Amino acid sequence: MAKQPDRTGNIEIDRKARLKIPRQSVPKQKPAARVHNFSEVYLGFDVETAKLEASRCLQCPDPSGCSKACPLHNDIPRAMWHIARGEFLDAAAVYRETSNLPEVCGRVCPQEKLCQGSCVVGKRDAPVFLGKLEYFVADYERRTGGIRKPALAPATGKRAAVVGSGPAGLAVAEELLKRGHAVTVFEILPVAGGVMVYGIPSFKLDKRVLADKVKCLEEIGVKFVCSTTIGKDKTVDDLFNEGFHAIFLGTGAWTPTTLNLPGENLKGIYMATEYLVRGNLPPEMLPAHMNTKPEAGRHIAVIGGGDTAMDCVRTSRRLQIQSGIADGTVVDYYRRTEKEMPGKAEERANAIEEGIQIEFLVAPVQFFGDDDGHVRKMELIRMQLGEPDASGRRRPVEIKGSNFVVDADTVICALGYNQDRLIEKTTPGLKVDKWGCFVVNSETGATSRPGIYAGGDNVTGADLVVTAMAAGRRAAVAMDAYLRGL
Ligand SMILES: Cc1cc2nc3c(=O)[nH]c(=O)nc-3n(C[C@H](O)[C@H](O)[C@H](O)COP(=O)(O)OP(=O)(O)OC[C@H]3O[C@@H](n4cnc5c(N)ncnc54)[C@H](O)[C@@H]3O)c2cc1C
């Protein structure tokens, strides 16, 4: 491969030499140790390995495949260029040009399907560890002086309310504040962060990471009003009457999909988010009705195949061990094959290292309880793959007569999420589709009501942190224009 000018245009890089640099590994806690704690599994790069790993980047010309594949279009080669030279704060600044949460995306994005999946180095060798390097620099910045505060435009005198403090809401809040508008975020839960706090376990994303970001937003002027439900404590129209000029709905998708199977209401059967929240968070971060640890039986069954299912198996394994059950089983049951699994492959591998089994091509049929109404066994049926369905994935079809029964004294259902209808019901004129998702202009996030915008999982259905953030950033641009036009 020919030498090409680097990103400053005046020094040549030797791509052949770069291709010879071996992929650097990221240290992680050993499985036997990490199942005893909820600390982050990955310990992160050190300075020298980060520089070496970043220097594997071939500095592809603009627009590079990795940047195109990132929903935020982060200028990844430019960040890699800085990291390779040890200019970590400059690299962090590159990410912050296009992302509000590089410290989160670097940890939880499915990079193998996004940036790393398009890395040219990956065609010959393992792709550059782009995600791990992204959060390395974001953490470096946090630890050396804190997240750098953005410049704020002069105050416009306009006020925006943001409902929900997940990645979509936080992105809107920061972007509107930067543009000179006053922003207040309303949140049902006691602590801001959405699923990033109340969902994704701390062994994947340390709660302090989000806490630092929220603190930074507070310091630059975002006001957070937690433990407040819009649609119940006050309505969207009450917010307009209080003097907010525009409102962003970033309420996510929190209503769990249920199985509708016999025995589903037995004790010991949980919905994923409730299990994760109660299993991972300290009581002081939880509403009163949720601040006790969930059960972790000897035979734990998780149903589902996405990131949430993997988070559940790994959380329940840790709780099982904390309860002194070292010889218990944790099995994930998924109705398709590994190829169709939607979650991140790396996290699946981590789960397997932690002793979790995954059973493919099986679906639950019913649950059996004991005299106290507690689940003890689960009946399953084997599946085979048929024709592709609307999602393009091959549809699972039952194999008649293949039913079997397994022990299961804790069952966790991780089947996906639907929309909560509270805001729709309490806000006249707000259009939703047949799934209850807000109908918006996909470029602007504008809903059917002037001045109300929406984005993230409440528009797309359950998706990703990065796509919710991207939607929030797009909406903020449109809201800024709307507010300035008033
Ligand atoms: C367990 C789990 C694990 C996941 N793992 C990953 C992962 O590894 N990688 C990844 O990219 N994505 C993951 N996701 C998906 C990702 O977290 C979501 O797609 C993303 O958080 C959606 O962002 P959002 O801003 O739309 O909503 P959310 O993050 O859901 O935030 C919405 C917020 O709005 C609040 N709210 C709702 N209604 C109201 C109301 N009426 N009034 C006030 N506040 C309200 C909620 O309490 C919540 O805090 C995971 C999801 C789950 C559930």
Image (cartoon, rainbow, N blue to C red):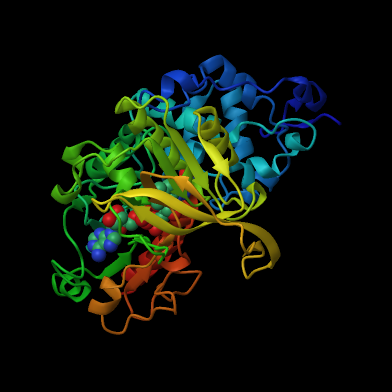
Q: Look at the picture and state if 283 lies above or below 387.
A: above
Judging depth in this view, the residue of 299 and 289 nearest the camera is 299
Point out the image quarter for the C terminus: bottom left
Q: Quadrant of the N terminus?
A: top right
Q: Please give left or right for residue 134 compared with residue 469 in the image.
A: right
Percent position of residue 66, x then y? 65, 44
Residue most toward the right?
Answer: 1
Q: Position of residue 111 (x, y in %)?
A: 59, 42
* Residue 230 vertical position relative to residue 80 in the rendered view, above or below: below
Question: In which of the image's four quarters is ligand 1 placed?
Answer: bottom left
Classify 401 as above or below 320: below
Of residue 476 and residue 52, the one placed in the foreground of this image is 52
Q: Answer with left or right where residue 431 lies relative to residue 93.
A: left
Q: Is residue 166 left or right of residue 302?
A: left
- Tell me how many marks there are: 0
Residue nearer the viewer, 382 or 294: 382
Residue 391 on image: x %, y %: 62, 66
The residue lying toward the viewer, choosing from 333 and 445, is 333
Q: Residue at x 82, y 25 (%)?
A: 16
